[in-house]
Amino acid sequence: MARSATVGHADELIRFARAWAPFGGPGDDEVFVTFGVGQAEFYQRVMSALATNSGGLPVCEAADLQRHCRRQLALLRAGARPSR
């Protein structure tokens, strides 16, 4: 039971990140309201989810989403607002 809930949550993270990626990613508000965490934690969780469960994405799409997450995390760490 716990495993399927975890997989379901990972899939939800991946779907959400994938839906927002063409727009530069979700804003702080969208992430917090949906997942209850800040953007940095969200991107870390998406990367972790992709590493353990690609959500059925083709390898190239999973790699693109990983790059997007790394880029957004780098911007956050630099004190810049992630692109939107």
Image (spheres, grey):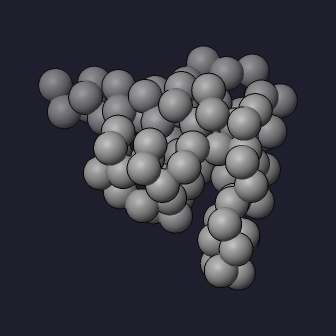
Percent across and percent down for residue 61 are: 77, 28
**Residue 18's spot in the image, x, y percent?**
64, 30
Q: Is residue 5 above or below residue 21?
A: above
Residue sticking out furthest to the bottom: 78
Query: Percent position (x, y) of residue 5?
Result: 25, 29
Query: Could you say which is closer to the camera, residue 43 or residue 27?
Result: 27
Residue 17, quarter of the rendered image: top right
- Report the side of 24 relative to 28 (left or right): right
The image shows residue 67 at horizontal and vertical percentages of: 78, 50
Could one spot residue 52 in this view of the protein? Answer: no
The answer to whether residue 16 is above or below residue 75 is above
Q: Identify the residue shown where x is 53% and y is 26%.
A: 15
Give the quadrant of residue 55.
top right
Residue at 19% of width from left, 33% of height from top?
A: 2
Residue 8 quadrant? top left
Q: Residue at x 29, y 51 (%)?
A: 36
Label total for image:
0
Q: Is residue 38 left or right of residue 49?
A: left
**Left or right for 64, reference 31:** right
| Residue placed most toward the observer, 13 or 82 | 82
Instruction: Specify whether residue 64 is in view.
Output: yes
Image quadrant containing the N terminus:
top left
Query: Residue at left 35%, top 57%?
Result: 37
Above or below 54: residue 81: below
Is 40 left, or right, of 32 in this rendering?
Answer: right
* Residue closest to the far left: 1
